[in-house]
Amino acid sequence: MIENIREKLITHKNQVVLLNREGQVVASDNHLFTLLIGSDIADINPFFETIAALVIEENQHIPFNCVIIPDANNKPKYYDIELHTGGTDENPFLIIYDFTEHYEYIQGISQEKNELAISNHFEAAKNRQLVAEKAFKNKFLANISHDLRTPLGAILGFVDLLEKTGLNYEQQEMIQTIRQTTLHAKGLIDDLLDISKIEAGALKIENKTFDFIDLMTHLEKIYVPKMATKHLAYKMEIDASIPNYLIGDKVRILQILINFLDNAYKFTHKGSITLRIKAGTVADKKMLLLVEVIDTGIGFPGNKAGNKKEIPIDSFTKFHTTEIEGHGLGLSIVKKILDLMQGDMHIDSEEGRGTTILVRIPVAIDDKVNTKKQIAVANTYQNVKMSKSYKLLIADDNEINQLLLTKILVKHGGFYIDAADNGRDVLEKVTLKDYDLILMDIEMPEMDGIEATIAIRKHPLASTRNTPIIGLSAHVLDSTITTTFNDAGMSGYVPKPYTREQLFEEMYRVLKIELLPK
Amino acid sequence: MSVSKKIVLVGHYGVGKSSLIRRFVQNIFSDSYQVTIGVHILKKIVPYKGEEITLVLWDIEGKENINQSRASYLLGTSGFIFVIDPTRDSTYQNLKEELIFLEKNYPKIPVIKLVNKSDLIDVEEFKKVLAIQNLEIDFFSSAKTGDNVEHVFMQLVSKMLGA
Ligand SMILES: Nc1nc2c(ncn2[C@@H]2O[C@H](COP(=O)(O)OP(=O)(O)O)[C@@H](O)[C@H]2O)c(=O)[nH]1
Ligand SMILES: [Mg+2]
């Protein structure tokens, strides 16, 4: 039994060949290769060509592992071959072992290993190239954004200067458009700069003490007039327990809030927008600012009314980018900034009913400097003291003029504004409500400004009768007309075209608004 | 009996050693990669100055270092061709050390330094890459197109036979 196994599986897997020093076969058991006595061993395979040279030196034992010798069908077979060169009176001999199965297995493994290594190499090279390209792109973006900001800043600066040169309505309107467009471009460029910084990992979150109340005042200044242009109610509900001085990245926090408020503004056409900020629990001088931006806007399509539910941020961003004008960078930047701050955000939305954004921003409390301060009244004209908000009625048949005037007033802040289209409309409105001031255009259809003023001055109710009225007229320099104004009972006049300063100067005079010493 | 010379192709796996030998001996090429393990020997008889020379070509398993190769494979070698792949810098990063190893262990044996796969690159550009790294190369070849293959082997023959 053992002999049988040995015969079949071991004996016939190897061969012993006796050679002379010329490399010719002297004897062979021919288990693997059939060799004729006296034949050249190199006839089996060129491998043996070198044997003749090696057998010259005596008493050597040289192993050759894994030598490939194809069989009659040209299929590779793998052999280990040992050369014994023998002593002086001995014959050199070879032992040939057939290890084909073993080496085929090894070949398979090597094949896999090498292919993987080569493809990894190319993957790695590709990655390196991608990283380099990305770095280049980011650097390029960063540079170009930076370079673009300088000229834009100059444009904005000159727009401001130009605005103070006494422009008429039309010019004012155009300069506003230039400013808006430039600001829009600047916003886009700032976003690009942010994106390139984020991608390059260069965006760092600051941790500095900042004045939280100042931040809120700043937001109020921006959004009270802005929301008024769309007749939206803007509410700020700021938790009084939030300390005045916090530690965090003020600029980025502002960026986050502005982004959400601007979004809300864009998607809300009636109703209100609320910014609510509550203090989370305080632990170890750390606190979460729990921010909610609640609007009554168009909401997120697909989320049917009555089914308010959370929206994945990605779909929200995508919706904003594709459905609504805008580049959608803002929201993705905010998301990244929040990630860097280790804050988070959630979006709840209902189609047609509105959206609530919940943001949690981690901050620290700087209690070295915490004294409580009040949020100051928003007022872009810092040099006047507005003791209250004034109710204004503006009368103008030209819609554009109405709009322009509204814009100027809203921007100033501190006015509630109603509008009338002609004298008759003015008379109706003043009977419904008391106004602090009427800005009255003279040339209007149906009933002009003079007639309306005369009628008001004859009104039975004293509060209505005594309403201050400022006439706005292109003919106001004509002295006869000035007399007509006075006779009609006007409290003041502003010539058209007027500058903002001229208008407010007259309004302050008539309303007895005090100018603060500068 | 004619003169017989042993030539060993060395270099990393996948640089095209087997392909070069197959192109030279059988004039065929395959895009598919069959990893060589151990050693595969082919021969080719070439005319040289009116004589017939038998070239015994040892296609050995490519390693990342020559000294990892089985020493017996390199016994009695008359000439080396060191092959690199210009698309994989790892195949020539240690070229200098490898050449020093050969020089030390096989003194006086000619070595040809060969950039294969020249069909895949801009040769002039790659020369600059080599220059930057201060590497000297003897020839460019392509086993795929057959470009320069025969010439390289014949150059080695003339070096071996001391012409
Ligand atoms: N394009 C191109 N591919 C080659 C060339 N030489 C070899 N290859 C390919 O490179 C891979 C490795 O070749 P191979 O001869 O097995 O390399 P070895 O491991 O050094 O023996 C195979 O897929 C070949 O088809 C060449 O000159 N040009
Ligand atoms: Mg190979």
Image (cartoon, coloured by chain):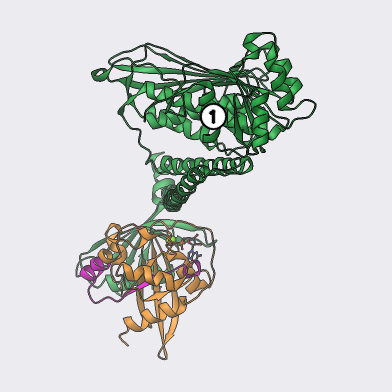
Chain colours: A green, B orange
What segment is highlighted magenta in the picture?
B99-120
Residue drawn at x 64%, y 42% is A170
Task: Tell me the crowding category of disc 1: few under 14, some 14 to 19, or many 20 or more residues within 10 angstroms, Cα based.
Answer: some
CB at mark 1 closer than 8 A to ligand 1?
A: no
Is residue B112 in the magenta section?
Answer: yes
- Image x and y of residue B158, in percent: 36, 84
Residue drawn at x 51%, y 58% is A75
- Image x and y of residue B112, in percent: 34, 74
Q: Amino acid at mark 1?
A: Glu
Residue bearing mark 1? A506
Instruction: Please state the chain letter of the residue tagged with numbered disc 1 in the rendered image.
Output: A
Whether A371 is drawn above or below A83: the answer is: above
- Image x and y of residue A495, in percent: 61, 36
If the image is split into quadrants, where does the C terminus of chain A sit? Answer: top left
Question: Residue A67: which quarter of the image?
Answer: bottom left
Question: Residue A356: which quarter of the image?
Answer: top right
Ligand 2 image-quadrant field? bottom left
Whether A516 is drawn above or below B161: the answer is: above
- Image x and y of residue A475, in percent: 67, 38
If the image is split into quadrants, where does the N terminus of chain A sit? Answer: top left
Decide if residue A322 is in sight here: yes
Is residue A357 in the magenta section?
Answer: no
In front of the other: B7 or A17? B7
Left or right: A141, with A457 as reference point: left
In front of the other: A460 or A251? A460
